[in-house]
Amino acid sequence: MPHPPAHVSLERALSKLGLASRTEARTLIREGRVRVDGRPAGDPLAPVVPERIRIEIDGRPAERPAPVTVLLHKPRGVVTTRSDPEGRPTIYGCLEGLAAHVIPVGRLDAATTGLLLLTNDTRLADWVTDPANAVPRVYLATVRGELSEDSARRLQEGIAEGGDVLVAERVTVRKRSRRETHLVLELTEGKNREVRRLLGAAGHEVSRLKRVSFGGLELGDLPPGQWRLVAPEEICAAFPGAPVRSSGIGPR
């Protein structure tokens, strides 16, 4: 059953407030360690308005942590998740020294490298990933075979795939041969695996894919596996109109 307007589940509220992941929140609630407005909370799916409730965890008031946003250069073969049943390395293994509990803003698949944002500010994450805000993502892609000018135009006109219409805002071919084509693509919707799906629908398998910018943030020369903090003023400049809180913390 959908929640009333402005309400979310209690487990999601703890996540949105940066207090725990949804899985961790569900465990805390079921173990009876969470109180809402002075009363024990037992249902992780109970509807609440995060900004209007008083939460205690283990008898202590739960304060919303200071906002932290991180830019990570995700390496190839690393998955965008907290843990992996296959035992593959995760992005959290790259965040040594970061004290904050952060979540990824969107995802990159295991084979894709480049710029990945993580934050504990869920309002910012929701705004950035909302397709209505058309935040641009720029990728460098290498595909098998020679991608023609007609195919490049089709990418910008939109191609139906898997029930979606996938489209690139801009396509620039940097180099082409019969063996492979190197190109730059800009997309704004953030659909699941959209670059690979779009190019696959045009008849070209992606062999390399790297995200080099997100909004006004650039990957630059940050080495693979390394991260840096993104200051609030940098976020304001990179994502005009986004809700931005004013302070953050650094490494432990």
Image (cartoon, rainbow, N blue to C red):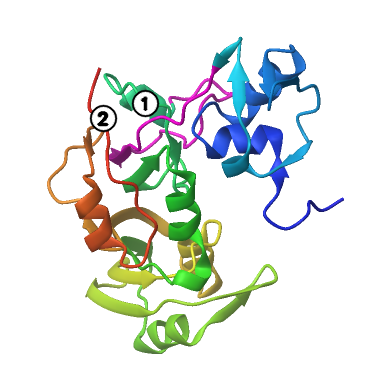
**Can the viewer see residue 205?**
no
Label 2's element? Answer: loop
Residue depicted at x 35% and y 74%: 146
Q: Residue furthest left?
A: 221
Label 1's element? Answer: loop
Per the image, the residue denoted by label 2 is 249
Q: Position of residue 117 (x, y in %)?
A: 35, 45
Per the image, the residue denoted by label 1 is 100
- In the rendered structure, the answer to whether residue 34 lies left or right of residue 62 reads right
- In the rendered structure, the answer to whether residue 177 lies left or right of residue 196 reads left
Q: Is residue 56 above or below residue 67?
A: above
Residue depicted at x 30% and y 23%: 98
Residue depicted at x 36% and y 68%: 136
Q: Residue furthest right?
A: 1
Q: How far apart in space, not on screen, are marks 1 and 2 (Cα)?
A: 8 Å
State which quarter of the image contains the C terminus.
top left
